Image: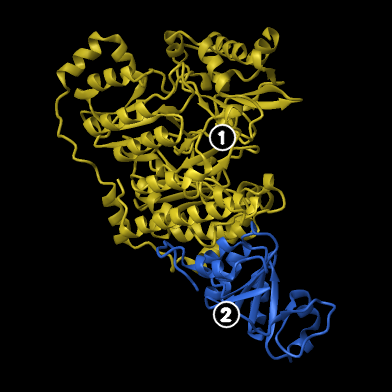
Amino acid sequence: MQLIKNKALTQDEWAFVADDAPLNADYNIVSLDRWNQERDSLIKQNNLGLRLESDVIIEDIIEDLSHFSLIELFIPVFTDGRAFTHSRLLRSRYNFSGDIRVNGDFMLDQIIYLNRVGISSFVLNDQDSAEKAIAVMDDFSAFYQESVA
Amino acid sequence: MYQYTDKDQTLINERVDQFRDQTQRFLNGEIADDKYRALRLMNGVYVQTHSPLLRVAGPYGLLSSAQVRKLASIARDYDKNFCHFTTRQNIQFNWPALERIPDMLEELASVQMHAIQTSGNCLRNTTSDQLAGVAKDELEDPRPYCEIIRQWTILHPEFAYLPRKFKIAVSGSAQDRAATHFHDIGLHLVKNDLGEVGFKVLVGGGLGRTPVIGQVIRPFLEKKHLLSYLEAILRVYNIYGRRDNKYRARIKILVREAGLDEVRKKVETEWALIKDQLELNEQSIADMRVQFADPAYADITETDASYTNSLANDSAFNTWVKHNTEEHKISGYRAVYVSLKAPDSPPGDCSDTQLDALADLADTYSFGMIRATHRQNLVLADIKEADLFALWQKLDALKLATPNIGKATDMICCPGLDYCALANAGSIDVAQGINDTLDSMDYIHDLGDLKINISGCQNGCAHQSVGHIGILGVDKKGVEWYQITLGGSSENDATIGERLGPSVSKEDIAPAVKTLLEVYVEQRSNEEEPFLDTFRRVGVTPFKEKVYAAN
């Protein structure tokens, strides 16, 4: 995988940990199921991230938002546009200021939209050109809608 | 009409560059088929039976003469010398080469046109009344609001990957000429008890496989809240619309399954949170209305003598005026329908020569503007009565004056099996067959107002379910058959047509229509009773008995 953040190819410690796998020392991204089941122990973790699938009801997790320093939105298929709304609401309505990361089956050509609804980092697969992914963020200089980036 | 600002122009220029890059990457094998498909659809590019098809946006149907000339030159340079006007006031080219589409878009951008979101699961071109701004029964011109909505929809980052396509129509008149009951969102300009003008908002209407009449979600919305209310509906739809089955994904299904009250509750809850953020201020509305201000009409107090004379002495002209022109809010003017339904031409098609000539006529007679209608005709909206005779002669020479607007041969027809990869059956040849049957113009006029809509498949692009007579092509083991519905309407009395009975074969469809019309003539209470009223009075039975007895 390749990670794009702040219009640059970069690396960080964050990693999604499967529900049945042991946690790393730090920088774990967990599923909502795991969070709901292991909340009491997870709450003691530093730098906890939460992965949200596209069928999440975002309002249900808002009260817990302060426990996370990263939210990862997982897009199951590029035609599923729910993450766009989730990100926008997290950023502008619920004032989440941590990293909002997108993972899964999104297209390079969606990055400019994702960026404008508040996504701050992008997990690309190895086949995608990171250079292109960064370049397409500047495809447009004129917009009709506000950005919450 | 609305003139692009630098920002509008920059945006569409950048879109051309973006699509050129996407297409090049696809041709280089760098984008997978399914992904490029989504990208090209959002720019109006379908891959059809013979070649790609490019659908160009006609924003609320309004075109300048310069734009029409550009359509003519594109038809010549990139297509087979014609284009097709659609039921959503858009323009289609049927024969472009994929690698040249970016060049076509660049040409379009030079006259403030684009193909953004004319297809795909996104916010589509906003449609309106073809008589907007000139209709006598208009409360307020809907076009400023259409343009405000157009800008809001273009490249909306949150709503580009909706469960399914999403269509908005706006009407400002007492009579609904924009089929607003059959859109995902229909907006009617209305007056409330305090005399303020705002919007009645309908939601969940649609045609296609499951025709549904839209329901009122909010009886009155202040103008300043237009965009926030639309955004609230779209956000609810984006989250709660079904994504598991594309035939169950339109907002009409969400409304049906969750119930209007539940959808309204969600929308109003969402709206309460955003209504102050997206407010349209009075100045921005006023500025937009200036863009659609009346052209410089002459002050005409007396009816032109030559016009009265021609009406009295030339019966062909008189007939054309009666059927193809409409009253105008300004005295001494009429709105003229340009019929794209000549008997020997596919409905909605227009040649490059006709387009060029129409652009000249618009410049000479109608302030340089042309409108496209959702029934696939064109309108020159501001014609002096004194100019009607000269205009008629010129239109007649161009085969654009068939006096059949709103009559049996003014059929809506999709491209059908001739062009469309989705079609089950032909539609243009069915229209042709019906035209051949109805070869007497006197008989057509005697039949009165009659809307025949023909779609080649259940997607219903030609709105067959709201035709007075609807014809739907179906495939039965590789053979083309046709289902007939009767009594549909897309106007104020919105109704979905009723099935006549079993489908009929291709050779029987034109005779069946002929029989239906004979039954109508026999059953009507007097010569003034229109087909739709007769059908509503006598019901389906007499039609059914005759058609299935005869065929």
Residue A96: mark in rendering: 2
Residue A51 pos. (x, y %): 70, 74
User: Does residue A10 show up?
Assistant: yes
Tag 2: amino acid: Phe
**B10 lies left or right of B522:** left
How many numbered marks are there? 2
Instruction: Specify the farthest residue to the right.
Output: A20
Give the structural element (helix, strand or loop) at label 2.
loop
x 35%, y 53%: residue: B196
Instruction: Please name the color used to draw chain A.
Output: blue
Instruction: Specify the farthest residue to the front.
Output: B28
x 30%, y 37%: residue: B65
Residue A56 pos. (x, y %): 69, 68
Q: Chain of mark 1?
A: B
Instruction: Please name the color used to draw chain B.
Output: yellow
**Where is mark 1, residue-wise?**
B461
